[in-house]
Amino acid sequence: MASIFTKIVNGEIPCHKIAETEDYLAFLDVFPLVKGHTLVIPKKEIDYIFNVEDELLTGLILFSKKIAKVLKASIPCERIGVAVIGLEVPHAHIHLVPINEMNDINFMKPKLQLSQEELATIAAAIRRNL
């Protein structure tokens, strides 16, 4: 069964897309820790990040770096935090989280409840800096 991220890649589930290449996709987390919380995935469904082939993993990191720079320019923050947890969705992904303090990337804290309109506005603001 395809992961929710594969369904997003295939267009079966909508997302607030930030950027896309032939191999990678960056989109807003719909249950964000902070505004601008972005997920970066390889389009190829691989459960565990350390099972991703070296070339694809290298590309994923470089694509994430590009997205992190755009996020930093778009969302007021000290820096972009990075997390790879890998338990919540069986599809390798990187969390890019605008942070000002350590607790901003605490996955145990309550998630923001943003409307689809708010998410669309945030995604559009980020895309303007691509």
Image: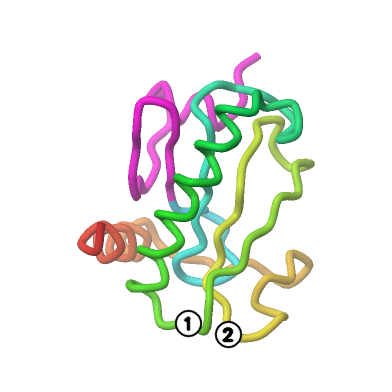
Q: Amino acid at mark 2?
A: Asn
Instruction: Using the image as rendered, state which of residue 115 and residue 91 is in the foreground.
Output: 91
What label sits on residue 77 in the rendered view? Answer: 1
Q: Quadrant of the N terminus?
A: top right
**1 or 2: tag closer to the N-terminus:** 1
**Which residue occupies 36% across, 48% down?**
16
Residue 63 magenta-drawn? Answer: no
Considering only vertical position in the picture, is 7 above or below 18? Answer: above
> Which residue of the protein is positioned furthest toward the top in this rendering?
1
Q: Residues within 10 Å of mark 1 (few under 14, many from 20)?
A: some
Position in image of residue 103 (x %, y %): 71, 80
Q: Is residue 56 left or right of residue 85?
A: left
Considering only vertical position in the picture, is 49 above or below 11? Answer: below
Magenta segment: 1-27
Q: Indicate the secondary structure of the residue bearing disc 2.
A: loop
Instruction: Using the image as rendered, state which of residue 92 and residue 7 is in the foreground.
Output: 92
Q: Indicate the secondary structure of the residue bearing disc 1.
A: loop
C-alpha gap between disc 1 and disc 2: 5 Å
Q: Is residue 55 left or right of residue 106?
A: left
Residue that badge 2 annotates: 100
> Which residue of the protein is positioned furthest toward the left in this rendering?
128
Q: Amino acid at mark 1?
A: Cys
Position in image of residue 11 (x %, y %): 37, 25
**Which residue occupies 74% across, 71% down?**
106
Q: Quadrant of the C terminus?
A: bottom left
